[in-house]
């Protein structure tokens, strides 16, 4: 199976997620508010007790998550090792579960939506869906090969 | 598989059960395809059930890992504070032995090499996170060891400056608790309204129940809180103004030896090294943004 285009799509999602996580982390580090997007709410979310896990800003975990995902995708693109793709799929699914929890917190507990956080979550969810498609194609290609 | 029967010289006996071997190229191609389909069907039949495939197992494992992360992050498994009356008891009460006798809103020795000021609003969720998750480590690692003089500073702004607002009244009540300030502080953060600000949580009755719970001198407390705690509210406003002039624009804001630090509620991973660097750089006594201890019940009329 050709890996160039799928890797570009998957890597694109992970790279955009990484950029958003870096931006939010820089704001958390500097103590500034994220730039306003339609809907607002980022300041409320950032000030809530849920913006930190174990005393660490959640955005830092986003850097770690998207960084590892991007690394897996690049490694798969370079080597074609299906295990890397599978690892990315598993990590992405873990991320989807966490993203769903975070959206629940925003909607039903904090009562504010942060557009940056939603955008980051979208990169995880759509990235995982893309990984699912690529993974299935890779499985089919293996079975037929 | 041999397909060329003519090369053998003798024709095999014709039986109705045995199909004729493919003779032409097209027949051979079709036979090969048929064999491939049969082999493929056999492989599928020999496969494990779908739910036992690596993909399914990995999917289940990923969902489980995600749920574990969510459960850990949600704090469902963390210890829950005991409830006394209508109050949650603080999980990490501030050690009373560390209270600065000269300033009931400070902990540790005034001669410590580093002064840490925490500009805070009792309604602020991030201040709550700092007070309940980071401050206990700061106190045990740096205040108790004589390295840090920790001072609580009022920056009451969430009630939009209203003298009878919850930020101001809570700050005033904590001051009115006198030498029980830190216990009052712990109770306020433990019982902060997690769903929003200015919703009536820190009412006069609630603050009075906190004063009872911490064992404050109730007569002095009631006298201090009479008439809207005007003197204490004025002191809260004065300290908030000092913070504003110094550049405080969010809570919590940490100041180290009088210098405001970026990052709001600094985790110990950044706060600790910053304090260590100050200790290493300067053995001289520390500085602070705000002047002398602000009024508290001990000095109030």
Image (spheres, coloured by chain):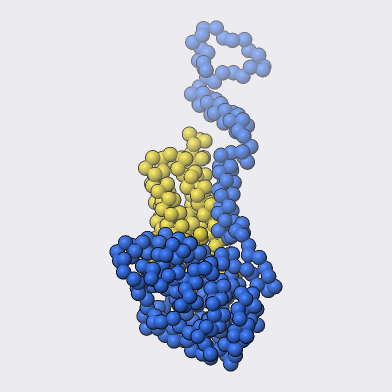
Chain colours: A yellow, B blue
Percent coordinates x, y for residue B235 in the rendering:
47, 86
Residue at x 48%, y 89% (from the top left corner): B234
For the question of whether residue B297 can be seen, the reply is yes
Quick one: which residue is furthest to the left in this view?
B281
Q: Residue at x 51, y 90 (%)?
A: B231
Residue B94 horizontal/vertical position (percent): 53, 68
Foreground residue among A132 and A27:
A27
Q: Residue at x 55, y 54 (%)?
A: B69
Q: In the shown orientation, is residue B204 left or right of residue A2?
A: right
Taking depth in this image into account, of A26 and B237 the one nearest to the observer is B237
Locate residue B169: give its quadrant.
bottom right
Q: Residue furthest top?
A: B10
Question: On the picture, is B188 further left or further right than A86?
Answer: right
Q: Is residue B134 above or below residue A135?
A: below
Coordinates of residue B193 in the picture (x, y in percent): 60, 74
Identify the residue shown where x is 47% and y is 40%: A83
Residue nearest the viewer, comparing B181 with A130: B181
Q: Is residue A33 visible?
A: no
């Amino acid at each position: 199976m050709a890996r160039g285009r799928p890797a570009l799509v998957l890597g694109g999602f992970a790279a955009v997620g990484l950029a958003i996580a870096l931006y939010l982390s820089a704001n958390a580090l500097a103590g500034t508010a994220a730039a306003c997007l339609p809907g607002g709410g980022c300041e409320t979310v950032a000030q809530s007790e849920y913006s930190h896990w174990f005393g660490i800003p959640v955005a830092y975990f986003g850097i770690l998550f998207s960084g590892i995902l991007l690394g897996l995708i690049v490694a798969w693109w370079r080597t074609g090792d299906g295990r890397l793709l599978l690892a990315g799929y598993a990590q992405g699914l873990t991320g989807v579960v966490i993203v769903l929890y975070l959206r629940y917190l925003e909607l039903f507990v904090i009562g504010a939506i942060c557009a940056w956080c939603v955008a980051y979550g979208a990169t995880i969810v759509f990235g995982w869906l893309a990984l699912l498609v690529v993974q299935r194609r890779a499985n089919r290609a293996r079975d037929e090969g | 598989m041999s397909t060329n029967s003519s090369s053998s010289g003798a024709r095999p006996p014709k039986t109705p059960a045995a199909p004729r071997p493919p003779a032409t190229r097209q027949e051979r191609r079709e036979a090969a395809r048929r064999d491939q389909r049969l082999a493929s069907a056999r492989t599928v039949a020999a496969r494990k059930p779908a739910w036992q495939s690596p993909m399914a197992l990995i999917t289940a494992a990923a969902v489980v890992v995600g749920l574990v992360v969510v459960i850990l992050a949600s704090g469902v498994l963390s210890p829950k504070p005991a409830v006394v009356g209508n109050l949650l008891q603080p999980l990490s009460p501030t050690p009373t032995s560390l209270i600065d006798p000269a300033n009931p809103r400070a902990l540790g020795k005034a001669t410590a090499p580093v002064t840490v000021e925490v500009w805070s609003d009792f309604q602020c969720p991030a201040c709550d996170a700092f007070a309940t998750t980071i401050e206990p480590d700061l106190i045990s690692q740096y205040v108790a060891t004589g390295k840090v003089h920790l001072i609580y500073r009022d920056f009451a702004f969430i009630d939009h400056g209203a003298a009878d607002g919850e930020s101001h009244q809570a700050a005033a009540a904590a001051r009115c608790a006198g030498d029980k300030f830190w216990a009052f502080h712990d109770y306020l953060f433990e019982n902060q309204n997690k769903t929003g600000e200015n919703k009536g949580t820190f009412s006069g009755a609630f603050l009075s129940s906190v004063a009872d719970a911490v064992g404050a001198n109730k007569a002095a407390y009631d006298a201090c809180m009479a008439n809207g705690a005007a003197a204490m509210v004025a002191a809260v406003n004065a300290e908030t103004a000092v913070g504003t002039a110094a550049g405080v624009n969010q809570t919590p804001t940490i100041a180290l030896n009088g210098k405001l630090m970026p990052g709001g509620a600094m985790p110990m991973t950044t706060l600790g090294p910053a304090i260590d660097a100050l200790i290493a750089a300067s053995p001289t006594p520390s500085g602070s943004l705000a002047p002398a201890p602000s009024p508290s019940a001990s000095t109030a009329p």
